[in-house]
Image (spheres, rainbow, N blue to C red):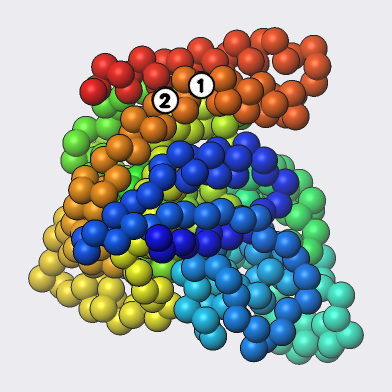
Amino acid sequence: MNKHLVGLLLGTEEDWPAAFEELARRAGPIRDAAGQQHELDVERITIEPFDLRATPSYDLVIDRLAYWYYVPREWLKKVALMDDVYLLNSPFTFQSMEKHAAYCAMMRLGLKVPETVLVPFKNPPDNAKWAYTAARYNKPFDLDEIAEKIGYPMFMKPYDGGAWVGVTHLQGPADLHAAYDESGQRLMHLQKAVEGYDVFARSLSIGAETMVMKFRPELPMHDRYEVAHDFLTPEVGDEVVTISRLVNAFFRWEFNSCENLVAGTEVHPIDYANACPDVSLTSLHYYFPWAMGALVRWTAFCAVTDRRPRMDLDTATYFAIADRDDLSYTDKLAAYRRLADDYFETDRYRDFCASRLSHLDAVVLEWVESASFDQLLIDTVRATYPPAEHDRFIAHFRGLVGLWVHDAKAAT
């Protein structure tokens, strides 16, 4: 039996790690093309001093921590550079997770990113050299003039933000100056709002799989993901999936979410760099079983087939497509999709799932119907909401997960 140790690098999450551990155990032995048996073993990684020459025991690591905690980030760089440990997200493109570089890259590739301007700090950084540098080199600017050029309404958003923290919808100059005053030492983008859009599509990609969900950002987190099907035309849906996979292949991310605003047939990416995408049971609810199944499938595929990590970005290949004047936007998207499918080995992955993991859907369904899952749901609700709301939310999420069970059974 070939055992593959999967490490989970975690912060405050408990629901999805417990789900992943349970499904990896229930998946049982997996045979490769040669008939050899493989098994996933899962361990939660602890943070401690590490010798740069020490050999890690992990074959693959799922990281949910290093985007803000530098000790594990440096450990991830070490195991990637020295030990070929497979990482779902490259630790060498974390700078692009700060949104700014991701905006630049996707604009360079021709995607319909709304007009975006980076503005300097409202308050200067705490650096002894600041006064001299600012006096000699900082060019005065007119914030109102920049805003007028972009056009209201717009958003002010942190260049390195996440979870909608610090994002402000600006209707006019008063909103602009209030938000800028509050930004302090945070670098901010001003981004043109896409008014009158039809759908806010949020897609979660795990390896070669993508789930596009209808998102309602104005609602509380437990209601933001609407259970809806066929809310995009096939053509627009395919474009949203292509953009999601393109972003991930370009930056070597395999566990990431992407936000697009759809207006008619136009797709505008507004946020697509999320080092720690939302996979909580209490927000994904109906889509949670899919996410956990996809995470197990991709992990198993990488481990069993000995998929090799590719840290080199090969950006020139993408830019060569972007710079071709003889290709339409649609043609460029198709070419990007081929590059993404090549990176994710999409055909090989589908064959692996069909031939080696065909039982996993039944495993996930059986588990979601079990008392074990229901207890996980109860524990998660109790850890998330105040006691007076426990009964309400337990019933709420049971209903949504029960709908997934009904639909999964109908599909078989």
Position of 172 compared to 412: left or right?
Answer: right
Position of 398 compared to 243: left or right?
Answer: right
Where's residue 305, x and y in %? 31, 65
Position of 379 compared to 62: left or right?
Answer: right
Where's residue 248, x and y in %? 39, 61
Going by the numbered disc 2, the residue's amino acid type is: Glu
Q: Which residue is mark 2?
A: 366
In the image shown, does 185 or 284 lie closer to the viewer? 284
Q: Which mark is residue 370?
A: 1
Where's residue 352, x and y in %? 24, 53
The furthest residue to the front: 1
Compute the Cα span from label 2 to label 1.
Answer: 6 Å
Q: Dividing the image into 4 quarters, which one contains the N terminus?
A: bottom left
In the image shown, does 147 or 158 lie closer to the viewer? 158
Q: Residues within 10 Å of mark 1 (few under 14, many from 20)?
A: few
Where's residue 297, x and y in %? 37, 48
Determine whether 295 is above or below 92 in the image. Answer: above
Confirm whether residue 225 shows in the render: no
Quadrant housing residue 386: top right
At horizontal 71% and vertical 84% (from top left) the residue drawn is 51
Q: Dividing the image into 4 quarters, which one contains the C terminus?
A: top left
Q: Residues within 10 Å of mark 2 (few under 14, many from 20)?
A: few
At horizontal 20% and vertical 48% (from top left) the residue drawn is 355
Quadrant housing residue 260: top left
Going by the numbered disc 1, the residue's amino acid type is: Ser
Confirm whether residue 280 shows in the render: yes
Query: Pointers 2 and 1 in contact (CB under 8 A)?
Result: yes
Determine whether 152 is above or below 47 in the image. Answer: above
At horizontal 34% and vertical 69% (from top left) the residue drawn is 307
SS category of the residue bearing label 1: loop
